[in-house]
């Protein structure tokens, strides 16, 4: 799901994209094309892989244009 222009979430994690930092090395798309799609809008499809796989690919971004954070879980009130 897309939250803001450059913020995407699957409920568990949120991936942020900073286009000002991107050097277009395409490591994200070459390594995980199911999530980082260069020809489709929105280009980050968070349902394309599990959170662990997405995190591993985000960490490979050479420019730091991609980052992630874990979403806080809401505690259920009983």
Image (spheres, rainbow, N blue to C red):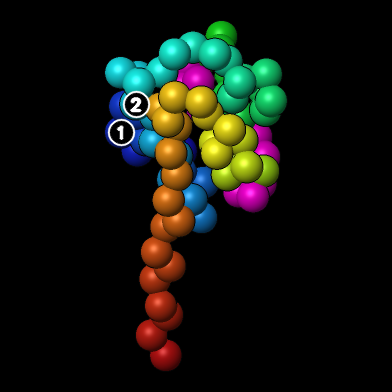
Where disc 2 sits, the SS reads: loop
Asked if residue 78 is positioned above or below residue 50 in the image, the reply reads: below
- Return the x and y of residue 24 as percentages of the image width and height: 49, 12
Reply yes or no: does residue 26 show up in magenta.
Answer: no
**Which residue is rendered at x = 30% and y = 33% of the image?**
4
Mark in front: 1 vs 2:
2
- Residue 1 place in picture, x, y as percent: 46, 38
Q: Position of residue 12 (x, y in %)?
A: 51, 55
SS label for mark 1: strand
First in sequence, mark 1 or 2: give its number.
Answer: 1
Q: Which residue is mark 2?
A: 18
Residue 77 shown left or right of residue 29 in the figure: left
Q: Residue at x 35, y 21 (%)?
A: 21
Q: Relative to residue 77, is residue 56 drawn left or right?
A: right
Magenta residues span 41-52
- Residue 77 in picture, x, y percent from top left: 38, 85
As rendered, which of 56 and 15 lies closer to the eye? 56
Residue under pointer 1: 4
Let me know if residue 44 is in the magenta part: yes
Q: Contact (CB < 8 A) between labels 1 and 2?
A: no
Q: Is residue 28 above or below residue 69?
A: above
Q: Which corner quadrant holds the C terminus?
A: bottom left
As drawn, the residue found furthest toward the front would be 62
Res 46 seen here: no
Numbered circle sitting on residue 20: none
Q: Residues within 10 Å of mark 2 (few under 14, many from 20)?
A: some
Res 74 → quadrant: bottom left
As measured in the structure, the alpha-carbon distance from the residue carrying label 1 to the one carrying label 2 is 12 Å
Instruction: Please name the residue shown 57% across and 44% down the image.
Output: 55
Can the viewer see residue 67 in this picture? Answer: yes
Q: Nearer the viewer, residue 16 or 47?
A: 16
């Amino acid at each position: 799901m897309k939250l803001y222009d450059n913020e995407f979430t699957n409920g568990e994690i949120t991936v942020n994209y900073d286009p000002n930092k991107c050097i277009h090395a395409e490591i994200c798309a070459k390594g995980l094309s199911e999530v980082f799609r260069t020809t489709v809008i929105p280009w980050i499809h968070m349902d394309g892989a599990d959170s662990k796989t997405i995190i591993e690919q985000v960490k490979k971004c050479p420019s730091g244009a991609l980052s992630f954070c874990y979403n806080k879980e809401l505690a259920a009130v009983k």
